[in-house]
């Protein structure tokens, strides 16, 4: 068995996954053997990555020696040094990195294409590959982002706002009498205590913002857009949102697999 290692480095968490490249379906997820989430650390060394991945893979009955290829996207540039060294030293291969020079198959209509985060491009590619039509990707990460793809498969642009967790942390840090709260769906919009009130503002407030932004985007672009949610809180937010059509928690990993396949020829024998 030959495995493809996919790595999505976010500002808060790093998501790793391994695909069996001999198994696929029209979504690209059937071959996903395992996926894990670890804290992002820009100073992590190649040896630390090796220890972490080896242990995680062994828990799933997999071996690191089965990894034949690797691709990563990162919004934290310092992490790439350790990841590249890890792949060279412990896997005996070169890490493919999403960035300038990598073929995406998607025209970028941003004024400066280099400003678009790698994760946003990866999500857009995966979303368009999934629906084959105009779409909006809402990613609930450290930032909440909206990314728009045209019916022709072009990355049009999007919007960025602070993430739900970031907003919650900001309230705790800058309002001395407000506690830390878990992001959850409260029973009532009108809270009867401080914790419930904060949860209501964060949850219902963000759902309202998502719905309003999606409505404004659809009205502005003038073409039909399916709205796909991803990120750690996507499932929770979709329970209340009226604009989210589907949740795809593995969207970024799927996009990395698609981009790898577009940029290389794999021998699966």
Image (cartoon, grey):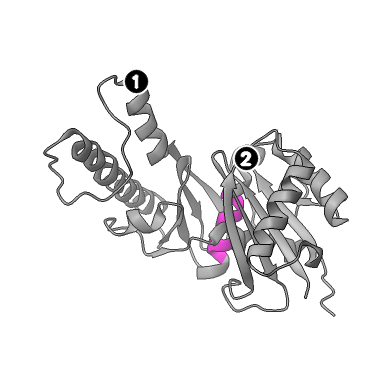
Badge 1 or badge 2: first in the primary sequence: 2
Q: Nearer the viewer, residue 254 or 103?
A: 254
Residue found at x 47% / y 55%: 137
Is 135 magenta? The answer is: no
Q: Is residue 19 left or right of residue 101?
A: left
Q: Position of residue 196 (x, y in %)?
A: 20, 40
Residue 183 in view in this figure: yes
Q: Any mark on residue 75, and which?
A: 2
Q: Residues within 10 Å of mark 1 (few under 14, many from 20)?
A: few
Q: Residues within 10 Å of mark 2 (few under 14, many from 20)?
A: some
Q: Is residue 33 left or right of residue 150?
A: right
Q: Does 220 sit above or below residue 160? A: below
Alpha carbons under labels 1 and 2: distance apart: 26 Å
Dividing the image into 4 quarters, which one contains the N terminus?
bottom right
- Helix, strand or loop at mark 1: helix
User: Of tags 1 and 2, which is closer to the observer?
Assistant: 1
Residue found at x 72% / y 57%: 54
Residue found at x 68% / y 50%: 52
Q: Is residue 183 left or right of residue 157?
A: left
Q: Nearer the viewer, residue 44 or 102?
A: 44
Residue found at x 16% / y 45%: 189
Dominant SS type (magenta): helix
Check whether the beta carbons of the residues at disc 1 and disc 2 lie within 8 A of each other.
no
Range of the magenta residues?
120-128
- Which residue is the site of mark 1? 174
Is 121 magenta? The answer is: yes
Q: Position of residue 149 (x, y in %)?
A: 52, 56
Q: Position of residue 167 (x, y in %)?
A: 37, 33
- Helix, strand or loop at mark 2: loop
Dividing the image into 4 quarters, which one contains the C terminus?
bottom right
């Amino acid at each position: 068995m030959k495995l493809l290692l996919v790595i999505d480095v976010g500002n808060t968490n790093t998501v790793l996954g391994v695909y069996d490249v001999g198994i696929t379906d029209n979504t690209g997820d059937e071959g996903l053997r395992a996926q894990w989430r670890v804290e992002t650390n820009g100073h992590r060394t190649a040896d630390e990555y090796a220890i972490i991945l080896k242990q995680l893979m062994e828990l799933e009955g997999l071996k690191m020696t089965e990894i034949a290829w690797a691709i990563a996207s990162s919004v934290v540039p310092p992490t790439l040094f350790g990841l590249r060294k890890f792949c060279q030293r412990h896997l005996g291969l070169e890490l493919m990195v999403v960035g300038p020079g990598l073929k995406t198959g998607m025209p970028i209509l941003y004024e400066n294409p280099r400003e678009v985060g790698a994760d946003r491009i990866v999500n857009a590619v995966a979303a368009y590959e999934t629906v084959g039509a105009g779409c909006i990707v809402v990613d609930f990460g450290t930032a909440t982002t909206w990314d728009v793809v045209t019916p022709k498969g072009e990355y049009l642009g999007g919007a960025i706002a602070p993430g739900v967790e970031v907003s919650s942390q900001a309230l705790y840090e800058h309002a001395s009498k407000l506690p830390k709260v878990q992001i959850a769906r409260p029973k009532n919009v009108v809270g009867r205590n401080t914790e419930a009130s904060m949860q209501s503002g964060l949850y219902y407030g963000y759902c309202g913002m998502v719905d309003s932004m999606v409505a404004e985007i659809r009205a502005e672009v003038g073409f039909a857009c399916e709205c796909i949610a991803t990120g750690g809180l996507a499932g929770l937010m979709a329970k209340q949102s009226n604009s989210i059509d589907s949740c795809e928690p593995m969207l970024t990993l799927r996009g990395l697999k698609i981009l790898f396949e577009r940029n290389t020829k794999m021998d699966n024998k």
